[in-house]
Image (spheres, helix red, strand yellow):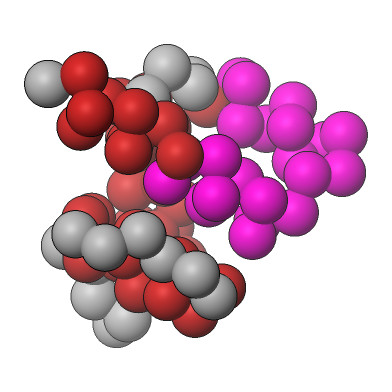
Amino acid sequence: MPLATSDSEIYGVVLTRLRESHDLSAYESIERLVQTGEAVGLDAKALIGMLDRGTTLDELLKLIQSRLDCLEEAA
């Protein structure tokens, strides 16, 4: 998968990797975000802490994307 360069491409990549639908409820989306965070070493408490400290959702998705890329390279 090519490296994403714009925010919309990053969201698309993350959604594709999550096999995410744009029709999910907010609760389901949050659950998938937490599951993906846990897969890259960020538990729910860490995710909440980051958001509480001002990390934007965009920054959080970029961090998760970066960690997913690292896991793929290591595999």
Locate residue 21, reporting x and y percent.
24, 75
Residue 45 lies left or right of residue 10; in this view the side is: right
Q: What count of labels does the image hold?
A: 0
Going by the image, does 19 lie left or right of 67? left
* Quarter in which the C terminus is drawn: top left
Seen at 67% across and 51% down, the residue is: 59
Quick check: 44 above or below 68? above
Q: Position of residue 35 (x, y in %)?
A: 32, 35
When asked about the image quadrant of residue 52, the answer is top right
Residue plotted at (50% across, 70% down): 5
Q: Does the stretch in magenta take in 46?
A: yes
Residue at left 20%, top 32%?
A: 72
Q: Is residue 12 above or below residue 71?
A: below
Residue extending furthest toward the left: 75
x then y, percent, for residue 26: 46, 66
Comparing 69 with 16, the one in front is 69
User: Could you say where residue 2 lies in the image, as x and y percent from the top left?
Assistant: 26, 63
Magenta stretch contains residue 23 = no
Residue at screen point 19% across, 59% down: 1
Q: 43 or 41: nearer the eye?
A: 41
- Residue 57 versus residue 66 in the image, above or below: below
Q: Quadrant of residue 69?
A: top left
Position of residue 54 in the picture relative to residue 66 (left or right): right
Q: Is residue 11 visible?
A: no
Q: Is residue 57 visible?
A: yes
| Image quadrant where residue 68 sits | top left
The majority secondary structure of the magenta stretch comes to: helix
The magenta stretch is 45-65
